[in-house]
Amino acid sequence: MTDHYKEGWNLDNSYARLPQAFYSKMDPNPVQSPQMAVFNDSLAESLGLSGEELNGDEGAALLSGNGIPDGALPLAQAYAGHQFGHFTMLGDGRAMLLGEQITPDGKRLDIQLKGSGRTAFSRGGDGRAVLGPMLREYIISEAMHALGIPTTRSLAVVTTGEPVYRETALPGAILTRVADSHLRVGTFQYAAKFTNPEDHKALADYAIKRHYPELEAEENRYVSFLRAVISRQAALIARWQLVGFIHGVMNTDNMTISGETIDYGPCAFMDTFDPATVFSSIDTQGRYAYGNQPYMAVWNLARFAETMVPLLDEDQEQAVGLAEKEISAFSQLFTQHWLNGMRAKLGLAKEEKEDETLIKELLDLMQKHRADYTNTFIGLTFDQLENANLSGDEAFTAWRQKWQERLNREEHSGEDAKELMRNSNPAVIPRNHRVEEALAAAGKGDFQVMEDLLAVLSHPYEHSEKQKEYAALPDPSECVYKTYCGT
Protein backbone atom coordinates (compact mmCIF):
# COMPACT_ATOMS: atom_id res chain seq x y z
CA MET A 1 0.00 0.00 0.00
CA THR A 2 1.29 3.47 -0.84
CA ASP A 3 2.33 5.59 2.12
CA HIS A 4 -0.06 8.55 2.14
CA TYR A 5 1.04 10.19 5.40
CA LYS A 6 1.92 13.44 3.64
CA GLU A 7 -1.69 13.80 2.54
CA GLY A 8 -2.86 14.02 6.15
CA TRP A 9 -5.19 11.04 6.36
CA ASN A 10 -6.20 10.17 9.91
CA LEU A 11 -8.93 7.60 9.35
CA ASP A 12 -10.91 5.52 11.82
CA ASN A 13 -13.70 3.04 11.08
CA SER A 14 -16.18 3.09 13.95
CA TYR A 15 -19.11 2.30 11.65
CA ALA A 16 -17.37 -0.92 10.63
CA ARG A 17 -17.43 -1.96 14.29
CA LEU A 18 -21.22 -2.12 14.20
CA PRO A 19 -22.79 -5.54 13.58
CA GLN A 20 -22.10 -6.92 10.09
CA ALA A 21 -25.78 -6.52 9.17
CA PHE A 22 -25.28 -2.78 8.68
CA TYR A 23 -22.72 -2.86 5.88
CA SER A 24 -21.00 -4.84 3.20
CA LYS A 25 -17.22 -4.62 2.87
CA MET A 26 -16.15 -4.00 -0.69
CA ASP A 27 -13.21 -3.62 -2.99
CA PRO A 28 -12.81 -0.36 -4.88
CA ASN A 29 -13.91 -0.25 -8.51
CA PRO A 30 -11.02 1.30 -10.48
CA VAL A 31 -11.72 3.73 -13.31
CA GLN A 32 -9.91 4.30 -16.58
CA SER A 33 -8.42 7.77 -16.37
CA PRO A 34 -9.23 9.79 -13.23
CA GLN A 35 -8.62 13.52 -13.34
CA MET A 36 -9.33 16.15 -10.70
CA ALA A 37 -12.13 18.42 -11.90
CA VAL A 38 -12.63 20.55 -8.79
CA PHE A 39 -11.02 20.42 -5.36
CA ASN A 40 -12.07 22.16 -2.15
CA ASP A 41 -8.84 23.47 -0.61
CA SER A 42 -10.46 25.19 2.38
CA LEU A 43 -12.43 22.07 3.33
CA ALA A 44 -9.31 19.95 2.92
CA GLU A 45 -7.44 22.21 5.31
CA SER A 46 -10.18 21.96 7.95
CA LEU A 47 -10.06 18.17 7.59
CA GLY A 48 -6.32 18.15 8.20
CA LEU A 49 -5.64 17.10 4.60
CA SER A 50 -3.01 18.55 2.30
CA GLY A 51 -4.47 20.18 -0.75
CA GLU A 52 -1.00 20.42 -2.21
CA GLU A 53 -0.67 16.62 -2.09
CA LEU A 54 -4.25 15.71 -3.04
CA ASN A 55 -5.13 18.26 -5.70
CA GLY A 56 -3.49 16.37 -8.54
CA ASP A 57 -3.01 12.95 -10.05
CA GLU A 58 -2.36 11.17 -6.76
CA GLY A 59 -5.46 12.68 -5.18
CA ALA A 60 -7.54 11.89 -8.26
CA ALA A 61 -6.44 8.26 -8.00
CA LEU A 62 -7.39 8.03 -4.33
CA LEU A 63 -10.69 9.86 -4.69
CA SER A 64 -11.79 7.71 -7.61
CA GLY A 65 -11.19 4.32 -6.04
CA ASN A 66 -8.01 3.56 -7.97
CA GLY A 67 -6.28 3.44 -4.61
CA ILE A 68 -7.30 3.84 -1.00
CA PRO A 69 -5.81 6.00 1.76
CA ASP A 70 -3.98 4.42 4.67
CA GLY A 71 -6.48 3.42 7.34
CA ALA A 72 -9.43 3.20 4.97
CA LEU A 73 -11.81 0.25 5.19
CA PRO A 74 -14.12 0.56 2.15
CA LEU A 75 -17.71 -0.48 2.71
CA ALA A 76 -21.25 0.15 1.50
CA GLN A 77 -23.88 0.95 4.11
CA ALA A 78 -27.20 -0.85 4.37
CA TYR A 79 -30.43 1.09 4.80
CA ALA A 80 -34.05 1.09 3.69
CA GLY A 81 -36.57 3.86 3.21
CA HIS A 82 -39.87 5.23 2.03
CA GLN A 83 -39.41 6.58 -1.48
CA PHE A 84 -42.39 8.75 -2.44
CA GLY A 85 -44.30 6.98 0.31
CA HIS A 86 -43.40 3.42 -0.67
CA PHE A 87 -41.13 1.33 1.56
CA THR A 88 -38.22 -0.50 -0.05
CA MET A 89 -34.85 -2.02 0.77
CA LEU A 90 -32.03 0.26 -0.36
CA GLY A 91 -28.39 0.73 0.66
CA ASP A 92 -25.36 2.40 -0.89
CA GLY A 93 -25.87 1.30 -4.46
CA ARG A 94 -23.27 3.68 -5.86
CA ALA A 95 -21.31 4.90 -2.88
CA MET A 96 -18.39 3.70 -0.81
CA LEU A 97 -17.50 4.84 2.70
CA LEU A 98 -13.72 5.07 2.99
CA GLY A 99 -13.76 5.76 6.70
CA GLU A 100 -14.02 8.58 9.20
CA GLN A 101 -11.45 11.35 9.13
CA ILE A 102 -10.47 12.57 12.60
CA THR A 103 -9.81 16.27 12.08
CA PRO A 104 -7.18 18.38 13.88
CA ASP A 105 -9.91 19.72 16.19
CA GLY A 106 -11.15 16.23 17.04
CA LYS A 107 -14.23 15.98 14.83
CA ARG A 108 -15.17 12.67 13.25
CA LEU A 109 -16.36 13.07 9.65
CA ASP A 110 -17.34 10.45 7.06
CA ILE A 111 -15.39 10.41 3.80
CA GLN A 112 -17.57 8.84 1.12
CA LEU A 113 -17.09 8.38 -2.62
CA LYS A 114 -20.35 8.83 -4.52
CA GLY A 115 -20.50 7.27 -7.98
CA SER A 116 -17.74 4.82 -7.14
CA GLY A 117 -19.26 1.74 -8.81
CA ARG A 118 -21.31 -1.31 -8.03
CA THR A 119 -21.89 -2.56 -4.49
CA ALA A 120 -23.87 -5.36 -2.89
CA PHE A 121 -26.83 -2.95 -2.84
CA SER A 122 -26.76 -1.79 -6.47
CA ARG A 123 -29.94 -3.68 -7.45
CA GLY A 124 -28.90 -3.98 -11.08
CA GLY A 125 -27.52 -0.46 -11.43
CA ASP A 126 -24.02 0.36 -12.63
CA GLY A 127 -23.12 2.26 -9.46
CA ARG A 128 -21.74 5.17 -11.43
CA ALA A 129 -22.60 8.88 -11.52
CA VAL A 130 -22.62 11.57 -14.17
CA LEU A 131 -20.45 14.69 -14.06
CA GLY A 132 -23.30 17.24 -14.13
CA PRO A 133 -25.20 16.01 -11.06
CA MET A 134 -21.98 15.58 -9.08
CA LEU A 135 -20.99 19.17 -9.83
CA ARG A 136 -24.52 20.28 -8.92
CA GLU A 137 -24.15 18.64 -5.51
CA TYR A 138 -20.75 20.28 -5.08
CA ILE A 139 -22.15 23.75 -5.87
CA ILE A 140 -25.36 23.49 -3.85
CA SER A 141 -23.84 21.82 -0.79
CA GLU A 142 -21.07 24.40 -0.59
CA ALA A 143 -23.60 27.22 -1.05
CA MET A 144 -25.70 25.76 1.78
CA HIS A 145 -22.63 25.62 4.01
CA ALA A 146 -21.86 29.26 3.28
CA LEU A 147 -25.48 30.14 4.14
CA GLY A 148 -24.93 28.56 7.55
CA ILE A 149 -27.27 25.64 6.95
CA PRO A 150 -26.19 22.21 8.27
CA THR A 151 -25.15 20.13 5.29
CA THR A 152 -22.88 17.47 3.96
CA ARG A 153 -20.01 19.01 2.04
CA SER A 154 -18.01 18.31 -1.08
CA LEU A 155 -14.26 17.79 -1.04
CA ALA A 156 -13.72 17.00 -4.72
CA VAL A 157 -15.17 15.87 -8.01
CA VAL A 158 -13.03 13.56 -10.11
CA THR A 159 -13.82 12.70 -13.71
CA THR A 160 -13.37 9.02 -14.49
CA GLY A 161 -12.50 9.09 -18.19
CA GLU A 162 -15.35 6.62 -18.75
CA PRO A 163 -18.82 7.16 -20.19
CA VAL A 164 -21.91 6.55 -18.09
CA TYR A 165 -24.92 5.39 -20.06
CA ARG A 166 -28.28 6.89 -19.21
CA GLU A 167 -30.46 8.07 -22.09
CA THR A 168 -27.20 8.87 -23.85
CA ALA A 169 -23.51 8.42 -23.06
CA LEU A 170 -22.42 11.02 -20.51
CA PRO A 171 -19.09 11.75 -18.81
CA GLY A 172 -18.65 9.85 -15.55
CA ALA A 173 -17.54 11.43 -12.28
CA ILE A 174 -17.10 10.65 -8.59
CA LEU A 175 -17.92 13.08 -5.77
CA THR A 176 -16.11 12.94 -2.44
CA ARG A 177 -18.75 13.72 0.16
CA VAL A 178 -17.94 14.74 3.73
CA ALA A 179 -20.60 14.27 6.41
CA ASP A 180 -21.04 14.18 10.17
CA SER A 181 -22.25 10.69 9.32
CA HIS A 182 -24.44 8.92 6.79
CA LEU A 183 -26.85 7.57 9.41
CA ARG A 184 -30.35 8.11 8.08
CA VAL A 185 -33.94 7.60 9.15
CA GLY A 186 -33.74 4.81 6.58
CA THR A 187 -30.87 3.21 8.50
CA PHE A 188 -33.17 2.83 11.49
CA GLN A 189 -36.00 1.57 9.29
CA TYR A 190 -33.62 -1.08 8.00
CA ALA A 191 -32.59 -2.00 11.54
CA ALA A 192 -36.17 -2.28 12.74
CA LYS A 193 -37.29 -4.48 9.85
CA PHE A 194 -34.25 -6.53 8.86
CA THR A 195 -32.07 -6.96 11.98
CA ASN A 196 -32.52 -8.40 15.47
CA PRO A 197 -33.27 -6.36 18.63
CA GLU A 198 -29.63 -6.46 19.78
CA ASP A 199 -28.36 -5.05 16.49
CA HIS A 200 -31.13 -2.44 16.48
CA LYS A 201 -30.11 -1.30 19.96
CA ALA A 202 -26.45 -1.26 18.94
CA LEU A 203 -27.27 1.15 16.10
CA ALA A 204 -29.17 3.48 18.42
CA ASP A 205 -26.36 3.42 20.97
CA TYR A 206 -23.84 4.16 18.22
CA ALA A 207 -25.88 7.11 16.91
CA ILE A 208 -26.24 8.55 20.40
CA LYS A 209 -22.54 8.21 21.15
CA ARG A 210 -21.56 9.73 17.82
CA HIS A 211 -24.05 12.59 17.54
CA TYR A 212 -25.63 13.13 20.95
CA PRO A 213 -23.09 12.00 23.57
CA GLU A 214 -24.61 14.36 26.13
CA LEU A 215 -27.65 12.03 26.21
CA GLU A 216 -25.80 8.87 27.26
CA ALA A 217 -26.42 9.56 30.96
CA GLU A 218 -30.14 10.36 30.50
CA GLU A 219 -32.66 8.22 32.39
CA ASN A 220 -34.33 7.25 29.11
CA ARG A 221 -31.74 8.15 26.52
CA TYR A 222 -33.79 6.73 23.66
CA VAL A 223 -36.66 9.13 24.31
CA SER A 224 -34.11 11.95 24.58
CA PHE A 225 -32.50 10.76 21.35
CA LEU A 226 -35.81 10.83 19.50
CA ARG A 227 -36.50 14.30 20.87
CA ALA A 228 -33.07 15.56 19.81
CA VAL A 229 -33.38 14.28 16.23
CA ILE A 230 -36.82 15.89 15.92
CA SER A 231 -35.45 19.16 17.28
CA ARG A 232 -32.54 19.27 14.84
CA GLN A 233 -34.75 18.47 11.88
CA ALA A 234 -37.28 21.15 12.86
CA ALA A 235 -34.46 23.70 12.90
CA LEU A 236 -33.04 22.42 9.60
CA ILE A 237 -36.29 22.49 7.63
CA ALA A 238 -37.02 25.99 8.91
CA ARG A 239 -33.63 27.08 7.57
CA TRP A 240 -34.51 25.57 4.18
CA GLN A 241 -37.77 27.50 4.07
CA LEU A 242 -36.12 30.76 5.04
CA VAL A 243 -33.79 30.73 2.01
CA GLY A 244 -36.26 29.19 -0.44
CA PHE A 245 -34.41 25.89 -0.77
CA ILE A 246 -36.29 22.94 -2.24
CA HIS A 247 -34.70 19.55 -1.58
CA GLY A 248 -36.79 17.80 -4.19
CA VAL A 249 -36.70 14.24 -2.87
CA MET A 250 -37.37 14.10 0.86
CA ASN A 251 -37.51 10.33 1.13
CA THR A 252 -36.79 8.84 4.55
CA ASP A 253 -33.39 7.64 3.35
CA ASN A 254 -32.54 11.29 2.62
CA MET A 255 -33.12 12.49 6.20
CA THR A 256 -30.09 12.32 8.47
CA ILE A 257 -29.92 11.54 12.16
CA SER A 258 -27.28 14.27 12.54
CA GLY A 259 -29.55 17.02 11.21
CA GLU A 260 -27.56 17.69 8.04
CA THR A 261 -28.96 18.26 4.58
CA ILE A 262 -27.99 15.27 2.42
CA ASP A 263 -28.38 13.94 -1.13
CA TYR A 264 -28.61 16.90 -3.49
CA GLY A 265 -30.46 15.35 -6.41
CA PRO A 266 -33.29 17.37 -7.99
CA CYS A 267 -32.70 20.30 -5.64
CA ALA A 268 -32.98 23.99 -6.43
CA PHE A 269 -33.61 27.42 -4.98
CA MET A 270 -36.91 29.12 -5.65
CA ASP A 271 -37.00 32.28 -7.75
CA THR A 272 -40.65 33.38 -7.93
CA PHE A 273 -42.32 32.78 -4.58
CA ASP A 274 -44.88 30.00 -4.80
CA PRO A 275 -45.39 27.30 -2.13
CA ALA A 276 -46.35 24.82 -4.87
CA THR A 277 -42.94 25.06 -6.56
CA VAL A 278 -41.54 21.66 -7.54
CA PHE A 279 -38.29 21.00 -9.38
CA SER A 280 -38.03 17.23 -9.43
CA SER A 281 -38.98 15.74 -12.79
CA ILE A 282 -40.45 12.69 -11.05
CA ASP A 283 -42.48 14.52 -8.38
CA THR A 284 -45.60 14.75 -10.54
CA GLN A 285 -47.96 15.05 -7.56
CA GLY A 286 -46.02 17.79 -5.74
CA ARG A 287 -45.35 15.60 -2.70
CA TYR A 288 -42.05 17.39 -2.07
CA ALA A 289 -43.06 20.91 -3.11
CA TYR A 290 -41.57 23.83 -1.19
CA GLY A 291 -44.68 24.36 0.91
CA ASN A 292 -44.96 20.66 1.77
CA GLN A 293 -41.44 20.26 3.17
CA PRO A 294 -42.39 20.77 6.85
CA TYR A 295 -45.21 18.21 6.50
CA MET A 296 -42.94 15.72 4.80
CA ALA A 297 -40.36 16.22 7.54
CA VAL A 298 -42.80 15.31 10.29
CA TRP A 299 -44.04 12.34 8.22
CA ASN A 300 -40.46 11.09 7.93
CA LEU A 301 -39.86 11.65 11.62
CA ALA A 302 -42.99 9.66 12.45
CA ARG A 303 -41.43 6.76 10.55
CA PHE A 304 -38.28 7.23 12.63
CA ALA A 305 -40.33 7.27 15.83
CA GLU A 306 -41.93 3.98 14.80
CA THR A 307 -38.50 2.37 14.63
CA MET A 308 -37.69 3.66 18.12
CA VAL A 309 -40.83 2.30 19.80
CA PRO A 310 -39.23 -1.02 20.92
CA LEU A 311 -36.47 0.96 22.66
CA LEU A 312 -38.61 3.59 24.36
CA ASP A 313 -40.40 1.38 26.87
CA GLU A 314 -41.00 -2.32 27.49
CA ASP A 315 -44.75 -1.59 27.49
CA GLN A 316 -45.66 -1.04 23.84
CA GLU A 317 -48.67 1.14 24.59
CA GLN A 318 -46.54 3.34 26.83
CA ALA A 319 -43.80 3.44 24.18
CA VAL A 320 -46.22 4.51 21.46
CA GLY A 321 -47.52 7.26 23.71
CA LEU A 322 -43.99 8.53 24.30
CA ALA A 323 -43.27 8.52 20.56
CA GLU A 324 -46.49 10.35 19.73
CA LYS A 325 -45.75 13.00 22.36
CA GLU A 326 -42.34 13.73 20.87
CA ILE A 327 -43.61 13.84 17.29
CA SER A 328 -46.41 16.22 18.26
CA ALA A 329 -43.79 18.77 19.32
CA PHE A 330 -42.41 19.16 15.78
CA SER A 331 -44.95 21.68 14.52
CA GLN A 332 -44.38 24.13 17.35
CA LEU A 333 -40.60 23.72 17.15
CA PHE A 334 -40.57 24.31 13.40
CA THR A 335 -42.92 27.28 13.59
CA GLN A 336 -40.83 28.94 16.29
CA HIS A 337 -37.61 28.52 14.29
CA TRP A 338 -39.32 29.77 11.13
CA LEU A 339 -40.94 32.77 12.83
CA ASN A 340 -37.67 33.78 14.48
CA GLY A 341 -35.89 33.52 11.15
CA MET A 342 -38.57 35.51 9.36
CA ARG A 343 -38.50 38.18 12.05
CA ALA A 344 -34.76 38.52 11.51
CA LYS A 345 -35.28 38.81 7.75
CA LEU A 346 -37.60 41.75 8.48
CA GLY A 347 -35.30 43.35 11.07
CA LEU A 348 -37.40 42.37 14.07
CA ALA A 349 -35.54 41.31 17.20
CA LYS A 350 -38.37 40.93 19.67
CA GLU A 351 -41.58 38.92 19.41
CA GLU A 352 -45.11 40.24 19.00
CA LYS A 353 -48.25 38.16 18.67
CA GLU A 354 -49.21 39.70 15.31
CA ASP A 355 -45.83 39.00 13.65
CA GLU A 356 -47.01 35.79 12.00
CA THR A 357 -49.88 37.61 10.33
CA LEU A 358 -47.54 40.36 9.13
CA ILE A 359 -45.17 37.78 7.63
CA LYS A 360 -47.90 35.77 5.93
CA GLU A 361 -49.45 38.92 4.45
CA LEU A 362 -46.10 39.68 2.78
CA LEU A 363 -45.77 36.14 1.45
CA ASP A 364 -49.31 36.26 0.08
CA LEU A 365 -48.50 39.49 -1.75
CA MET A 366 -45.30 37.97 -3.12
CA GLN A 367 -47.20 34.97 -4.41
CA LYS A 368 -49.99 37.08 -5.92
CA HIS A 369 -47.55 39.32 -7.80
CA ARG A 370 -45.04 36.57 -8.63
CA ALA A 371 -42.29 38.42 -6.82
CA ASP A 372 -38.81 36.95 -6.50
CA TYR A 373 -38.37 35.51 -3.02
CA THR A 374 -34.71 36.36 -2.38
CA ASN A 375 -34.66 39.74 -4.08
CA THR A 376 -37.82 40.95 -2.35
CA PHE A 377 -36.11 40.62 1.02
CA ILE A 378 -32.97 42.26 -0.39
CA GLY A 379 -35.14 45.11 -1.67
CA LEU A 380 -36.66 45.56 1.78
CA THR A 381 -33.20 45.46 3.35
CA PHE A 382 -31.79 48.22 1.16
CA ASP A 383 -35.02 50.12 0.40
CA GLN A 384 -34.66 49.32 -3.30
CA LEU A 385 -37.93 47.85 -4.48
CA GLU A 386 -38.31 49.82 -7.70
CA ASN A 387 -37.79 46.74 -9.86
CA ALA A 388 -39.87 44.39 -7.72
CA ASN A 389 -43.25 43.20 -8.93
CA LEU A 390 -44.70 44.58 -5.70
CA SER A 391 -43.74 48.16 -6.42
CA GLY A 392 -46.75 50.44 -6.78
CA ASP A 393 -49.27 47.92 -5.42
CA GLU A 394 -51.61 49.59 -2.91
CA ALA A 395 -51.85 46.51 -0.73
CA PHE A 396 -48.08 46.29 -0.55
CA THR A 397 -47.82 49.99 0.28
CA ALA A 398 -50.24 49.40 3.16
CA TRP A 399 -48.26 46.36 4.28
CA ARG A 400 -45.03 48.34 4.19
CA GLN A 401 -46.57 51.01 6.41
CA LYS A 402 -47.67 48.34 8.89
CA TRP A 403 -44.16 46.87 8.85
CA GLN A 404 -42.62 50.30 9.49
CA GLU A 405 -44.92 50.80 12.46
CA ARG A 406 -43.84 47.40 13.77
CA LEU A 407 -40.18 48.36 13.35
CA ASN A 408 -40.82 51.54 15.30
CA ARG A 409 -41.86 49.44 18.28
CA GLU A 410 -38.47 47.70 18.37
CA GLU A 411 -36.06 48.56 21.15
CA HIS A 412 -33.02 48.58 18.87
CA SER A 413 -32.13 51.32 16.40
CA GLY A 414 -33.01 51.48 12.74
CA GLU A 415 -29.40 50.73 11.85
CA ASP A 416 -29.47 47.67 14.11
CA ALA A 417 -32.55 46.46 12.25
CA LYS A 418 -30.81 46.95 8.91
CA GLU A 419 -27.75 45.08 10.14
CA LEU A 420 -29.95 42.21 11.28
CA MET A 421 -31.57 42.12 7.83
CA ARG A 422 -28.23 42.23 6.02
CA ASN A 423 -27.07 39.25 8.08
CA SER A 424 -30.31 37.33 7.52
CA ASN A 425 -31.01 37.93 3.82
CA PRO A 426 -28.44 36.49 1.41
CA ALA A 427 -27.39 38.70 -1.47
CA VAL A 428 -27.03 35.65 -3.68
CA ILE A 429 -28.28 32.10 -3.90
CA PRO A 430 -27.23 29.46 -6.44
CA ARG A 431 -29.90 30.41 -8.94
CA ASN A 432 -30.89 27.62 -11.29
CA HIS A 433 -29.84 29.37 -14.49
CA ARG A 434 -26.42 30.21 -13.04
CA VAL A 435 -25.90 26.62 -11.91
CA GLU A 436 -26.95 25.32 -15.31
CA GLU A 437 -24.60 27.80 -16.99
CA ALA A 438 -21.72 26.50 -14.87
CA LEU A 439 -22.58 22.86 -15.56
CA ALA A 440 -22.85 23.47 -19.30
CA ALA A 441 -19.41 25.12 -19.37
CA ALA A 442 -17.90 22.33 -17.26
CA GLY A 443 -19.32 19.77 -19.66
CA LYS A 444 -17.17 21.41 -22.32
CA GLY A 445 -14.09 21.37 -20.10
CA ASP A 446 -14.35 24.96 -18.82
CA PHE A 447 -14.54 24.96 -15.00
CA GLN A 448 -13.86 28.69 -14.60
CA VAL A 449 -17.56 29.58 -14.74
CA MET A 450 -18.17 27.22 -11.83
CA GLU A 451 -15.19 28.53 -9.88
CA ASP A 452 -16.44 32.11 -10.32
CA LEU A 453 -19.91 31.10 -9.16
CA LEU A 454 -18.52 29.30 -6.11
CA ALA A 455 -16.43 32.35 -5.18
CA VAL A 456 -19.52 34.57 -5.19
CA LEU A 457 -21.61 32.04 -3.26
CA SER A 458 -18.95 31.57 -0.59
CA HIS A 459 -19.85 34.88 1.11
CA PRO A 460 -23.62 35.24 0.62
CA TYR A 461 -24.05 37.99 3.22
CA GLU A 462 -21.23 40.17 1.91
CA HIS A 463 -23.58 42.24 -0.31
CA SER A 464 -20.80 43.23 -2.71
CA GLU A 465 -21.17 44.90 -6.10
CA LYS A 466 -20.03 41.70 -7.82
CA GLN A 467 -22.88 39.77 -6.24
CA LYS A 468 -25.49 42.01 -7.84
CA GLU A 469 -24.65 40.47 -11.20
CA TYR A 470 -25.41 37.02 -9.81
CA ALA A 471 -28.61 38.22 -8.14
CA ALA A 472 -30.15 39.14 -11.48
CA LEU A 473 -33.22 37.15 -12.44
CA PRO A 474 -33.12 34.75 -15.37
CA ASP A 475 -34.55 35.61 -18.75
CA PRO A 476 -37.71 33.65 -19.51
CA SER A 477 -35.69 31.40 -21.80
CA GLU A 478 -33.32 30.58 -18.90
CA CYS A 479 -35.98 29.49 -16.41
CA VAL A 480 -35.30 25.95 -15.24
CA TYR A 481 -38.45 24.23 -14.07
CA LYS A 482 -37.15 20.70 -13.64
CA THR A 483 -33.97 19.14 -12.35
CA TYR A 484 -33.05 15.50 -12.36
CA CYS A 485 -31.53 13.04 -9.94
CA GLY A 486 -28.90 11.95 -12.44
CA THR A 487 -28.71 8.44 -11.06
Image (spheres, helix red, strand yellow):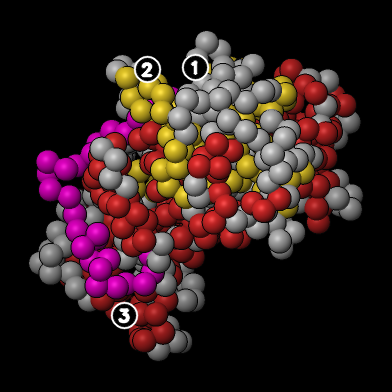
Give the Cα distance between marks 2 and 3. Answer: 59 Å
| Viewer-nearest of discs 2 and 3 | 2
Asked if disc 1 and disc 2 are in contact, CB closer than 8 Å, the reply is: yes
Label 1 or label 3, whichever comes before in sequence order: 1
Q: Earlier in the sequence, mark 2 or mark 3?
A: 2
Crowding near the residue tagged with mark 1, few <14, some 14–19, many ≥20 C-alpha atoms within 10 Å: some
Q: CA distance from mark 1 to mark 2?
A: 9 Å
Q: Which mark is residue 126?
A: 1
Mark 1 and mark 2 lie on one chain; the one further toward the N terminus is 1
Q: Residue 302, relative to residue 11: is it above or below? A: above
For numbered disc 3, what is the local secondary structure? helix
Looking at the picture, which amino acid does disc 3 mark? Glu
Q: Which amino acid lies under the numbered mark 1 shown in the image of this protein?
A: Asp
Q: Secondary structure at mark 1?
A: loop
Relative to residue 458, is residue 98 drawn left or right? right
**Vertical order, 160 against 475 (above or below):** above
The x, y position of residue 316, in whole percent, is 82, 28
Residue drawn at x 28%, y 33% is 482
The residue at the point 32 percent across, 33 percent down is: 483
Q: Report which residue position mark 3 lands on.
A: 405
Q: Decide which of 423, 25 is in the foreground and name it.
A: 25
Residue wearing tag 2: 165
463 lies left or right of 65: left
Residue 378: give x, y in percent of width and height.
28, 68
Q: Of tags 1 and 3, which is closer to the observer?
A: 1
- Assign the magenta stretch its main secondary structure: loop
Q: Residue furthest top?
A: 124
Q: Residues within 10 Å of mark 3 (few under 14, many from 20)?
A: few
Kind of residue at badge 2: Tyr
Point out the image quarter for the N terminus: top right
The percent position of residue 409, horizontal first and vertical second, equals: 40, 83
